[in-house]
Image: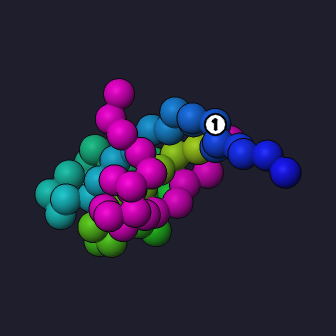
Amino acid sequence: MGFYRKKPVVVEAIQWTGDNEKECIDFMGEAAFAFLGLKEYVIRHNDGTFHAETEDDFNKTYEKI
């Protein structure tokens, strides 16, 4: 048995605020239309995929650098 720590991963993210549609589209391209309106953070992974997280989950997992 051993202890393991999740390696830190740097990701790019944006939060849909309700009035930053252009910024979200610039960040995600056409994929933005699947996420707009969720008012969640959208994370872009190194492989180019996106997923959304609630603000609470995002803040528990990530810190701004």
Task: Answer left or right for 6 relative to 50.
Answer: right
Colouring rule applied to residues: rainbow
Q: Which residues are magenta?
A: 47-65
- 29 or 9: nearer the viewer: 9
Image point (72%, 45%), residue name: 3
Task: Answer left or right for 63 relative to 20.
Answer: right
Give coordinates of residue 33: x percent, y percent: 42, 65
- Residue 31: tell me if it is visible: yes
Q: Residue furthest right?
A: 1
For residue 8, above or below residue 19:
above
- Residue 30: tell me if it is visible: no
Q: The C terminus lies in which quarter of the figure?
A: top left
Q: Residue furthest left?
A: 19
Q: Residues within 10 Å of mark 1 (few under 14, many from 20)?
A: few
Image point (58%, 44%), residue name: 45
For residue 21, above or below residue 62:
below
Q: Quadrant of residue 56 in the image?
A: bottom left
Image point (71%, 44%), residue name: 4
Q: Quadrant of residue 53 in the image?
A: bottom left
Give coordinates of residue 17: x percent, y percent: 19, 59
Query: Label 1 belongs to which residue?
Result: 7
Give coordinates of residue 27: x percent, y percent: 40, 42
Task: Answer left or right for 11 relative to 27.
Answer: right
For residue 8, above or below residue 50:
above
Image point (64%, 43%), residue name: 6
Give coordinates of residue 26: x percent, y percent: 37, 41
- 14 or 6: nearer the viewer: 6
Query: Under tag 1, what secondary structure?
Result: loop
Q: Is residue 62 magenta?
A: yes
Q: Residue furthest bottom?
A: 38
What is the three-letter code of the residue carrying label 1?
Lys
